[in-house]
Amino acid sequence: KKFRLIMKKDNNKKRIVLLDTHAIIHRAYHAIPDFSTSSGEPTGALYGLSSMILSIVGTLNPDFIIACYDMPGGTFRSEADSTYKANRKKNDDELNDQIKKSRDLMDAFGIPYYEKKGFEADDLLGTLAEVLKKDKDNEVIISSGDMDTLQLVDGKKVQVFTLKKGLTDTVLYDEKAVKLRFGFGPKLLPDYKGLRGDPSDNIIGIAGIGEKTATTLITEFGTIEDIYKKLKKDKTLFKKAGVTDRIVKLLEEGEEEAMFSKTLATIMRDVPIEFSLPEKTWRDSISIKNVEKICERFEFKTLPSRFNKILTGEDLAPKKEEEKVEEDIPKDELRKVSIALWLIDSEKNNAKLEDIYNFAKTRDFAEAKKIIW
């Protein structure tokens, strides 16, 4: 389901959006691989993250936005199992560079962020959601680029706003939606991964047990602990539920792997961090000037107006000084410099004055012409 209108909220409640920043950046990096500044600096992941934040603001209308980050180095999971996420490729330098710069974006957008050595962003999201949902006046929505955080869903108190495909096709999961999607509730998702594994994180589960069998076992018998308790007590219960002797044998042989895989798949909710909601709401914290500055740095030309429109309902008006400058520049001169810029950057096949200024990093046309020449 795509959300085109702002999601209604109870005005008495504070809506808090928690960003799974790494997951969103990774999705954006692969969705917009060739996006870059005029000097060749890759910015696709940063642009995708900015667009996602705009989508969140326009759709969810949050009172607060808080970002969570992974930190470089291992986590308690990789210490427990050296193969955890071992099959994942190391981040490209271009991606790592954009992850670092994304913190500057957060500062400019008035979004506080949290990170903790030894823990993943998911663990911070789980911890913050656990703290925030205790207040009946809070409504928590986790925004992510994948489905890992669905285990944190709790009724409508904690929901997950995630990307289905690309950067625009989104879906909001409450507890009912999770049950419709998987056939069981959010709390059983770590058990599901414990049985079937998760190749993307190198969680092995039990070899030979796939999605269908894992779903049957969980819907019939509950958690992994309950499954083994019942298996040891009475095997006939499994035959009655249509579980084959082969699957029963796999369960018996794979108990240790299932238990350990569940542990790896379980998001922590008690990371030791100091946290408090900002004193000001997100709308009161953000400065359009800061947005303009960071967008100028990364050459995101349309974003300031989009931000302003969401915040005030108005487009940013073009500056009169710039309009006057353009009028004073002979058209043939502007055309020559535009063609020269196109020779430098083939994507700028019809460069405007603003493109010329952005490339030359100056608002003086004569100086810009000299640099481009």
Image (cartoon, helix red, strand yellow):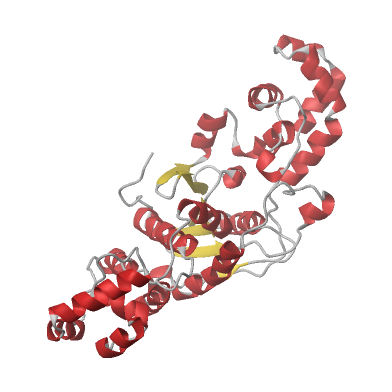
Asked if residue 91 lies left or right of residue 287, the reply is: right
x and y percentages locating residue 330 in the rendered image: 13, 83
Judge whether residue 152 can be spotted in this image: no
Residue 270 visible in the displayed image = yes
Image coordinates of residue 190 in percent, x first then y, are: 69, 39
Residue 92 is situated, as x and y percent measured from the top left of the image, at 61, 60
Q: Nearer the viewer, residue 339 or 89?
A: 339
How many marks the image carries: the answer is: 0
Q: On the image, which quarter does residue 150 sit in? A: top right
Q: Foreground: 25 or 329?
A: 329
Which corner quadrant of the image does residue 48 belong to?
bottom left
Question: Which quadrant, please, contains the N terminus?
Answer: top left
Residue 5 picture location, percent across and down: 30, 49
Residue shown at 50%/35% (left/top)?
176
Quadrant, the C terminus: bottom left
Q: Is residue 89 above or below residue 307?
A: above
Q: Is residue 281 left or right of residue 6?
A: right
Left or right position of 307 against 143: left
Q: Is residue 265 above or below residue 176?
A: below
